[in-house]
Image (tube, helix red, strand yellow):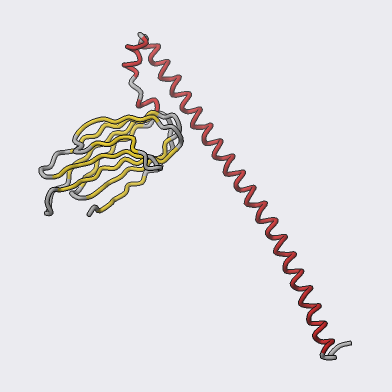
Amino acid sequence: MYITISITCVLAFIAVQAEALNFQLPADTEKCLREEIHKDVLVTGDYDVSQQASVKVFLKVTDSNGHILYQKDEATQGKFAFTTDDYDMFQICFSSKADFKGKLPPQDVELQIKRGVEAKNYDDIAKTEKLKPLEVELRRLEDLSESIVNAFAYMKKREEEMRDTNESTNSRVFYFSIFSMLCLIGLATWQVLYLRKFFKSKKLIE
């Protein structure tokens, strides 16, 4: 039975971000990295897992809907890459399974994640398009500027959505307050009329 240990990382994406993680993975456990990534962003990962006799490590990359973007059984060393179709929460999980029960030393896991401009291989782009070093650097700066603009546009959109939500909430609270006040006034009026009728029936008042 696996012991699940979750590492939650919610990172604000600015295009040139790269992340290197080193951690230990005990036998029969699972460790996950969760990360929010914007739409149309290239994500690459390099992983290296130390080998341990009688222990297998499985790697799985999924989105919030459970779609498998990358999967590797008996993962030791390798790379993965995917491009996001939409803004979503992605999860990278390393799970360990031992062939027998007993005390085993943990395995060392090294994971490097790159996204956006940092994930692109500009050497390959230069060879394919026959670009000069200055043109490659200009391409990199162009991609970086575009990523930053997209990030700010997304933040502006989120701010507008939050403002609209706040205004909608305030409007609903206002109308609910008016409705509650009218209900209280109606209830108070009914109580007065009922008590007046009751006292008249008892001939306590005229």
Front one among 18 and 7: 7
Question: Residue 52: which quarter of the image?
Answer: top left
Q: Give the image location of residue 62, x and y in percent.
A: 35, 39
Q: Give the image location of residue 94, x and y in percent.
A: 25, 42
Identify the residue shown where x is 69% and y is 56%: 174
Residue furthest bottom in the image: 203
Quadrant of the image containing the C terminus: bottom right
Mark count: 0
Above or below, 176 against 206 in this view is above
Identify the residue shown where x is 35% and y is 30%: 82
Instruction: Judge from the rendering whether residue 164 lies leftward or rightward of residue 185; answer left or right.
Output: left
Residue furthest right in the image: 206
Front one among 130 and 81: 81
Question: Residue 198: which quarter of the image?
Answer: bottom right
Q: Give the image location of residue 179, x and y in percent.
A: 71, 61
Q: Give the image location of residue 148, x and y in percent.
A: 47, 28
Identify the residue shown where x is 73% and y is 66%: 183
Instruction: Judge from the rendering whether residue 116 lies leftward or rightward of residue 178; answer left or right.
Output: left
Question: Residue 83: which quarter of the image?
Answer: top left
Instruction: Judge from the rendering whether residue 7 lies leftward or rightward of residue 193; answer left or right.
Output: left
Above or below, 39 against 30 in this view is above
Quadrant of the image containing the N terminus: bottom left
Identify the residue shown where x is 70% and y is 56%: 175
